[in-house]
Amino acid sequence: MKASYTIYRVHLSIGLLSAALIAFQLALMQVLSIVQWHHFAYMVLSVALLGFGAAGTFLALLRERLLARSATIVPALMLATGLAMAVLVDAVQLPSVRFDSYLLFADYSHWGRLLVTYLVFFLPFFLGALAIGMVFVREAAAIGRIYFANLLGSGAGGLLALGLAWLFIPARIPALIAALPILAALVILPRAGRVPLALFALLTTGIMVWKVTQPPILRPSQYKDLSKAMLLPEAKITMERSSPFGLVQTLSSPVLRYAPGLSLVAGQAADVRLAAFVNGDWYGALMNYRPGDTAMVLDYTTMALPYAMRPRERVLVLRAGTGTEVAHALSEGAASITAVEPNAPVLSLLQGSLATASDSLWYAQGVSVKEMEPRTFLLMDTGHYDLVVLPLVGTFGGSSGLYALQEQFILTREAFGEMWYRLREGGAVVISSWMDYPFRNPLKVQATLLEVLRDLGVRDPALHLAAVRSWGTITFVLTRSPLSPAEVAGIRAFCDRVQFDPLLLPGLKGEERTFYNELGDPRFFTYVDGLFSPKREQLYEDYDFNIRPASDNQPYFSQYIKWGSLERLAGFFGNRSLPFFEVGYVLVVVTLVQVILLSFILIVLPLFRLGWRGGGKGRTLLYFSGIGMGYMFVEMILIQRFTLYFGNPVYAASAAITVLLVASGAGSYLSERFGEARRCLPLVLAAISGLLLAYSFLLTPLLRATIHLPAVIKGVVAILLIAPPAFLMGIPFPAGIAQVSKRGPEVIPWAWGVNGCVSVVSTAGATITAVELGATGVLVLAAAAYGMTLLAQVGRGQES
Amino acid sequence: MNLPIPIAVVILAISLSLSQDGYKEQREKMVRQQIERRGVKDPAVLRSMRTVERHRFVPPGSASEAYEDGPLPIGYGQTISQPFIVAYMTEVIRPRPEHKVLEIGTGSGYQAAVLAGIVKEVYTIEIVPQLGTSATTRLKNLGYKNVKVKVADGYWGWKEAGPFDAIVVTAAAEFIPPPLLEQLKEGGRMVIPVGSPFMNQNLMLVEKRKGRNLTRSLMPVVFVPFTRQK
């Protein structure tokens, strides 16, 4: 059946569908982050994205039949994609389908539910990708321009998701996005067979409009902070605001209180007016703060330690959240407080409609607010402070690994080094940690501070480090000058007043460490002392958890897992409890294993049925695997590095992805020429590989050197750094497709399938590589992947 | 297949009695393998753990897992603690028959039932109304007469019934509520767990001694060497 529309319509249609698939992916990510947690979202979506690869295989198997009726089937698939997008969130909210990630290791029936969720999420990606794949095969001669439309659409989809997230509640967005595939279908509606397709379009549009006007009610996991808070008496959501930074909600209840690790001599905990949550996770408390207050609940926590040592006039609060540490500094008499907070919507609320709930704290005299990633601020700032305050590390009762894969650039050795240089004479950096068991957070904090002091060439680190311990928290203070006798006396007096014990202090006696708060496992003190020893390297090696300090290259402070220790720990704590030590990282590995298995079953295995006529199978597969892996690895590192560069996680990621996709699109547009001129392709691949290798060593220093520049110039720098490799990286896929199509059209699905399969596996693989080898390692591997592609291409050239 | 009613009743009775026996055996095994072996020695605690029918305190669908060595979900984001943790927390407060004990966080009522088998009076507070109501009914139906349940904010304790010889906090909080310390008798003991829902290995003991509140971090799985021996 011949299509009755121009090729430009096909470009437009593919662009719209591609935009929808990317926007839908991002919208689902947010929905899943609200009902579960972000790494579960990642796990579910990785599997869903296998739909791309599986579509290639499906197409390979039924190519003749599908292509014979492609003019009807392609728009029908687009409409089906729209329909799936419109109803998908409802489907996974059904009581019999809804899974709870916390229960995966406690109630094994939830694995079945997870499987159903996978299948449901798989559907729109499979249908949409099948439509794109059919066009790729049908228009193989003009693949460069089709791929350009695909990439340009994808870039636009990212921006669209960003815009929608500002305007609509997350539950409404997936159905809204469903309009795009419907539109994509209408653009290429054929003359013949128009009536049934038009009816289908009408039905899909009706359902889409219904779901937009009646969005599903999202039901978060019962283990999310907000769900638990909602069970409190008279709890109610008082405000809700959606944005790409997440869904901000505030909750009120008369029984909300705040006092992390409160001293047992404190009269009472602080009443909380409102609690703020982002995507259902605790973000902070809004408490009473009256200007002129000289006592507050935090005075009865270990966080008051630096103020007990000496007055602090100029204070820098990093990741200020809802401002409890700002209020604390004010009550301690600080004259100037700089509060740095990256979450723009939270800040705007705190300074706007919620200002009265915290007694206009953010407008108090001496308080200035910076909306930025704290580490970016540190890199750009030139001020000096008496105290730098970091947020509390870990969670009450021990980290359950929720943050294991989150880059925490303010907790790296380099970051503490920068804080040191921002201190005035007598100044200090303060960081507190929840006491956990097995011991992880406090040991890593201490190890980091000690290594920083050694990096700085401080002769006796013990004179620059003090720490006190309550029943639940430990606060460490890193001082610019050696601790004075007056400061040591102040710390002892503070400990006696609030019944805490000194942990690190010059001249400390062993029995002082447990005067008020004993530890069941006294080996903690052995480890603490061991970190001062020249043999600490041995402790890092032998300890069952990774307590080696994080670095800018591997900024995963909360990643404690050591794979070699898992078996031993499982023996002590039981298999069921074990995942909760490091659930985030464990799930990425689970994701990797399942995508490898599923991609083999869904993509590779069926292709064997199809067979392969002619030679060059190995080289073709190597070629498309290399570009799949290389592209994903580069994308991940660019997002990570530019987030730090711009100091805004949402916009930086979107900008990086958009520049990457658009530049790649331009590259693919021009690829048809390279496809013909075979000599050029090896050059392109060699250039990519060389550029990435150079970036693995130069990107971070280049960004560091230009981070102080105005935002506009930084934008230009970003484009200049991202566009050249991205442009080149857009060439190999369409050029390769054009080449293999000459061998026989049945090879295209193989190429596409393997590329899709490796791309999805690489998303999880890049994360694991970044944790284990660092950003440099990921870029070197990306360069190696393109090098592998180059070898395959050279081999193919010789063959032909 | 339709069975005559008397035959069906007999089959049901036989299967019920068989399953009850099965639970008793499982309970015995639980005490021997999970609790005694890990060092809980108090005879009164062991007796109570052998007596209380844990499978009646878990959701019906989880009854077959009731005696396994782990916590189980009971809904509303709450769990029933691992059997060993319940036994350990009970032993740690050194319960005596004349004691009056306060529990914060009734949950399904299992910890209260274990305490009720040892001490004179148990007062238990649950903040989630649904859980509090179902625990009240459950404990009443099972014949626990020395347990009083209240749906309220546990932060304030149960002042009218205090002071208490011991306090068991089963719902972990980021702080130890000051009013609870006030309601603890001189020489009394309070135990609270610290941990995520499925991993509450870390327990805290607070003792009131001569005006000082002493805390002790207790690790039930203590003596785990976290450094490998070379």
Image (cartoon, rainbow, N blue to C red):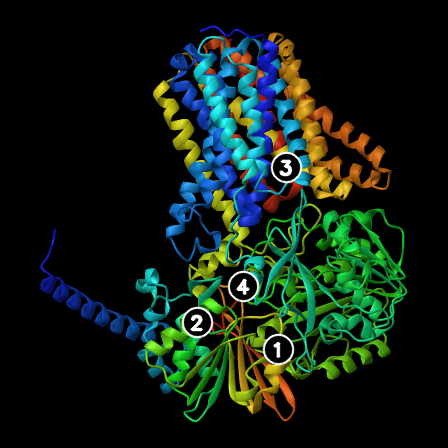
Using the image, determine if residue B127 lies above or below residue A54.
below
Asked whether, in this view, residue A708 is left or right of residue A749, the answer is right
Residue A82 can be seen in this image: no
Residue at 43% across, 71% down? B133
Q: Identify the subunit bearing mark 3.
A: A
Q: Identify the subunit bearing mark 1.
A: B
The residues tagged by marks 3 and 2 sit, at their Cα atoms, a distance apart of 50 Å
Mark 1 element type = loop
Q: Nearer the viewer, residue A143 or A564?
A: A143
- The disc at residue B133 is 2
Mark 2 element type = helix
Residue B28, image quadrant:
bottom left
Q: Dot 1, how many residues are within 10 Å of its Cα: few (below 14), some (14-19), or many (20+)? A: many
Identify residue type, mark 3.
Met
Identify residue type, mark 1.
Pro
Mark 4 element type = loop
- The disc at residue B150 is none
Residue at 52% across, 6% down? A4
Q: Which residue is mark 4?
A: A231
| Pointer 1 or 2: first along the chain | 2
- The disc at residue A636 is 3
Residue A608 can be seen in this image: yes
Identify residue type, mark 4.
Leu
